[in-house]
Amino acid sequence: MPQVRIIAKNFMDMVGALPAMKLDKLYENAFICEAVLRSLPPLAKNYVLQMLYVDAPVTAKSMEEWVLSDGFSKHKVAIDRLLQLRIFLEATDRKRETSIKLNPKFQRNLQTYLIYGGALPREPMPLSITMRLPTLDDLEAYAHDQWECFLLQLISSAQVERPANFSSSMMKVFQRGLLSARDNETPRLTELMDTNAQLWYIIREYISTAQERGLDPTDLISFLLELSFHAMGEAYNLNSLTEVQSKAIKDLADLGLVKLQQGRKESWFIPTKLATNLSVSLSDSSSRKQGIVVVETNFRLYAYSSSKLHCEILRLFSRIEYQLPNLIVGAITKESLYTAFEKGITAEQIISFLQQNAHPRVAERTPAVPENVTDQIRLWEADRNRVEMIPSHLYEDFPSKEVFEAASDFAREIGGLLWEDSKKMRLIVRGESHQDMRDFLRRQK
């Protein structure tokens, strides 16, 4: 899913921004090496595996010969990504010829992981201590309830029966990523994303504010990626955690990533599917969830769910008429859509949400959502926004066609490309991507 891929890439940008010493410290963990490998673009993965058993540096010119001329821009993007994450290290000799080699720590630990597998720093606790653990179905239901409860608290705290233990300041941090809150207004979800995309937003915000809470972001990143390799449903002793991990595990329980249990003498945590999917999401291979929504040609909407969260999300862009124990009935109207547009929700987000959450009975149809409904949603948005103002930057006067193509591919990869003219070598990129583009172009010199 594109949303997951972009957000997970943003998370890896955060990893790449760590100081060199802390990045090397991360790569001492073989599981993190595997997780980072999963996050790479296909060509970059290929380069890592090609270099995995090459000890001598390889010249940059030699590596350019690994691809055809029309793939040079993708080659540059892959190399830049690997250099940013310090997976590749550059060196320049007396003749000013640049050579590249694999980070020795990353190389050694990934070799070990691929050949022998990895050994987690903690072993599952025996059943003689934990006795009866939750079934996988019970654990998935728990994770689902915790996550929905957390999101519902972000959307409408009045609807929450069991509020999370996060402070009000932390809830505001999370709202910054997932919600849009105007003065004197209730915050509303502005991105109708799937669970993995939402989770990565929260994780990114949680790590970016770690230092404010007295935690080391590197330790948090290491723990989260390592946690994704634990066995779902197994019990792990809380006493095996460090001080930073012990503080984080309570927050992760509020999000539904782990379940905490107390025995007579010992306490333990049990990873849920949300936790074990973290590193899988980096490779954008998340599975499709069961749909609940049926939309009719008369704009009537039926959602087969008893979830308060689903009801609140549907209320963002439709008029809820009544709710039965397992059925929500509503209608998509011009007024309900205008309310959604004012909150920053776009027509494409609404249509994507309806398509991705289509009930199995209609999901196999083409299209899953009636065309007259999707066309009218777009028309109502266009009617309201005849002119859209997007802060942007124009790039021109590129030194060569290769640099232009590399910049174009990079802008497209980070989701910032608005327009390009390949003949005149000009680009228009979103304003929020300007700093990333500047850093990228500086590296091209």
Image (tube, helix red, strand yellow):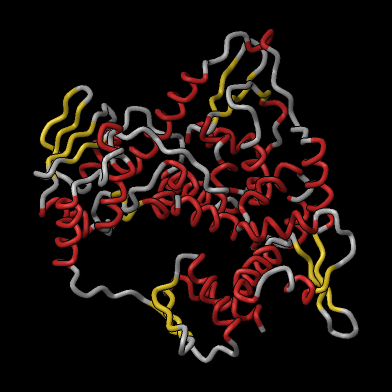
Which image quadrant for residue 96? Answer: bottom right
- From the top left corner, tell me how far across and down residue 441 is, in percent: 59, 80
Q: Residue furthest front?
A: 68
Looking at the rendering, in which quadrant would you find the C terminus?
bottom right
Query: Horizontal placement of 29 versus 177: left or right?
Result: right
Residue at 29% x, 49% y: name it.
Answer: 188
Residue 370 in sight in this render: yes
Query: Horizontal placement of 374 versus 123: left or right?
Result: left
Q: Nearer the viewer, residue 150 or 283?
A: 283
> How many numbered circles are shown?
0
Query: Horizontal placement of 376 versus 7: left or right?
Result: left
- From the top left corner, tell me how far across and down residue 190 is, in percent: 31, 53
- From the top left corner, tell me how far across and down residue 197 is, in percent: 45, 47
- From the top left corner, tell me how far across and down residue 431 is, in percent: 42, 75
Rendered position, 174 above or below 428? above
Rendered position, 246 above or below 193? above
Residue 158 in sight in this render: no
Residue at 64% x, 76% y: name it.
Answer: 69
Residue at 70% x, 26% y: name it.
Answer: 239
Q: Nearer the viewer, residue 412 or 362?
A: 362
